[in-house]
Amino acid sequence: AMASSVIPAAAARAERAIVDHLRRAGATAAGAAVPLPELSPLARRRLGQLVDAGVVVPADGGYWLDESLWGSYRADRRT
């Protein structure tokens, strides 16, 4: 049972690190995309899921965060 609870927590941390990085860089609009640092395999998977959901948008060799979609994405997962 222990192992199953570790994965979501690690995934949530990886996701939060991606979002925090984009926010700190001011990458919250299409013209403000920034590259992400080297990501772990888990973080890359989370990034893929965020991109699929439209929350993180690839642009100009980097990424930017859609804050409004991020808010609704997190709310949807909590329900």
Image: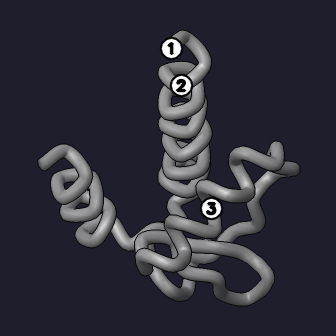
- Mark 3, other Cα within 10 Å: few <14 / some 14–19 / many ≥20: many
Sequence-first tag of 2 and 3: 2
Describe residue 18's horizontal placement relative to residue 73 as left or right.
right
**Mark 1 closeness class: few <14, some 14–19, many ≥20 residues within 10 Å:** few
Q: Earlier along the polypeptide chain: callout 3 or callout 1?
A: 1
Between the C-alphas of marks 2 and 3, the distance is: 20 Å
Left or right: 19 as drawn, with respect to 58: left
Residue found at the far front of this picture: 1
Q: Which residue is mark 1?
A: 1
Mark 3–mark 1 Cα distance, whole angstroms, equals: 26 Å
| Image x and y of residue 22, in percent | 56, 56
- What residue is shown at x 55% (from left), y 75% (from top)? 51
- Residue visible at 42% across and 75% down in the picture: 53
Q: Nearer the viewer, residue 67 or 7?
A: 7
Q: Secondary structure at mark 2?
A: helix
Element type at mark 3: helix
In this view, the mark in front (3 or 1): 1
Q: Within the image, what quadrant is residue 70 found in?
A: bottom left
Q: Which residue is label 3 attached to?
A: 47
Q: Marks 2/1: CA distance?
A: 6 Å
Residue with the mark numbered 2: 4
For disc 2, the neighbor class at 10 Å (few under 14, some 14 to 19, many from 20) is few
- The reply to whether dot 2 and dot 1 touch (C-beta < 8 Å) is yes
Colour convention of the picture = one colour
Q: Is residue 69 above or below residue 44?
A: below
Measured from the top left, where is residue 11 in percent x and y?
56, 38
Residue 49: image location, x then y, percent? 54, 66
Q: Is residue 41 above or below residue 64?
A: above
Dot 2 and dot 3 residues touching (CB under 8 Å):
no
Q: Secondary structure at mark 1?
A: loop
Tell me: residue 34, above or below residue 14. Answer: below
